Amino acid sequence: MCKQIYTNLRYVSPLFSMNKAALTIADRIARAQPALSRTQHKMAEYVLAHQFRVATMTIDEFATAAGVSVATANRFARALDLPGYPQFRAELARGFEAALEPVEKLRTELAHSASAVQIFAATLEEDIRNAQRNLQTLDAAACEQAVDAILAADRVFIIGFGASGFLAGMLQRGLCMHLHSVESLAGPGGVSHAARQMSRMTSKDLVIAIGFPRYLADTVTLAGAAKQAGVPVLVLTDKPTSPLAPTASVVLYAVSTRQLIPNSETAALGLIEALSAAVAYRAKNSVAAAAGVTQSVMPWLIHGVGKR
């Protein structure tokens, strides 16, 4: 029964020379399984079924989840030819680094006591630091190219999913007053709807792709498809190593580090509002457009608040 659960693992031949550091945990389990005890087999089953979860666990948490002692958890790591649990967990986390980083940050922060107001202050200070860095690293040429590309496009399509879907909506709201056609593809139809729209895009259109940690593969795939189809792509992301950067005709960066969560939406939104303001400044008839919108929403506004 125990042996059957490993039939789906790749067999590692003794004749095949492989650096130990290159072995995955699944490889190590497959290689060690003939010598594993019944308890260790059960632990291996748990690890294979919950690799990401185990990669976030301390040794005490793993021992509790697997129903064993801390000493047994350490012996299991050594049975996989690793010095101990820390090395086991590090090997298990390989490939999950970007996804696990916020978890580790949160674990580190929770190890120190802090009041609610201290957390408020630290978070706002992070936003200030991000804004200062983004101001200092503004690329004048990229800013001009981004605004030119938006104003020259026949139609603008905005791609962003997950948290970036909300950012896409804010960008669409900021641009719609000044453009003939701007559409956020982060709607209820999801990725399939966005993919369907690709067929009607041309080189005269513009795709704006938004992606910050944690990056979503769907956004990268669609931005890459737009680039291959000859559609210009403006990317809003956090750094040159972002997987979205290679798809860009023009790219704008916003440092968006956050200690307790994966990403600072404040930094991303700051970039979006700056871009929207620059487009509004350069667009023709922007004053008339603003006046028209104000007149349209006037019946829904509350007037005279605060006046004596």
Image (tube, rainbow, N blue to C red):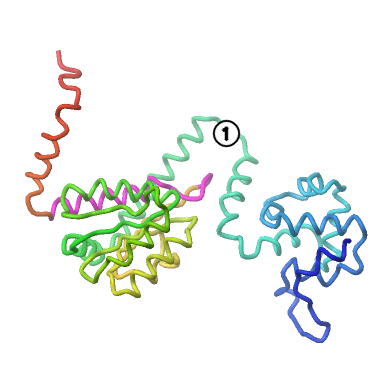
- Does the magenta-highlighted stretch encompass residue 280? yes
Which one is nearer the viewer's eye here, 303 or 133? 303
Which one is nearer the viewer's eye here, 121 or 205? 205
Q: Is residue 162 left or right of residue 28?
A: left
Which one is nearer the viewer's eye here, 235 or 154? 154
Q: Estimate the x, y position of residue 291 in percent, counting from the top left.
A: 9, 39
- Quadrant the N terminus occupies: bottom right
Q: Label 1, on which residue?
A: 114
Q: Residue at x 17, y 33 (%)?
A: 297
- Quadrant the C terminus occupies: top left
Mark 1, secondary structure of its residue: loop
Q: Which residues are magenta?
A: 259-282
Q: Estimate the x, y position of residue 149 in percent, counting from the top left.
A: 21, 64
Q: Is residue 223 left or right of residue 261?
A: left
Which one is nearer the viewer's eye here, 255 or 64? 64
| Quarter of image, res 193 | bottom left
- The tally of labels here is 1
Badge 1 local density, few (<14 within 10 Å), some, or many (20+)?
A: few
Q: Is residue 259 left or right of residue 289?
A: right
- Does the magenta-highlighted stretch encompass residue 180? no
Q: Residue at x 70, y 62 (%)?
A: 92
Is 80 drawn above or below residue 64 in the view shown?
Answer: below
Q: Amino acid at mark 1?
A: Ala
Q: Estimate the x, y position of residue 185 in percent, counting from the top left.
A: 34, 54
| Quarter of image, res 150 | bottom left
Q: Estimate the x, y position of residue 283 in percent, counting from the top left.
A: 12, 54
Q: Residue at x 23, y 65 (%)?
A: 205
Magenta stretch, main secondary structure, is helix
Is 286 drawn above or below residue 137 in the view shown?
Answer: above
Residue farthest toward the bottom in the current orientation of the protein: 15
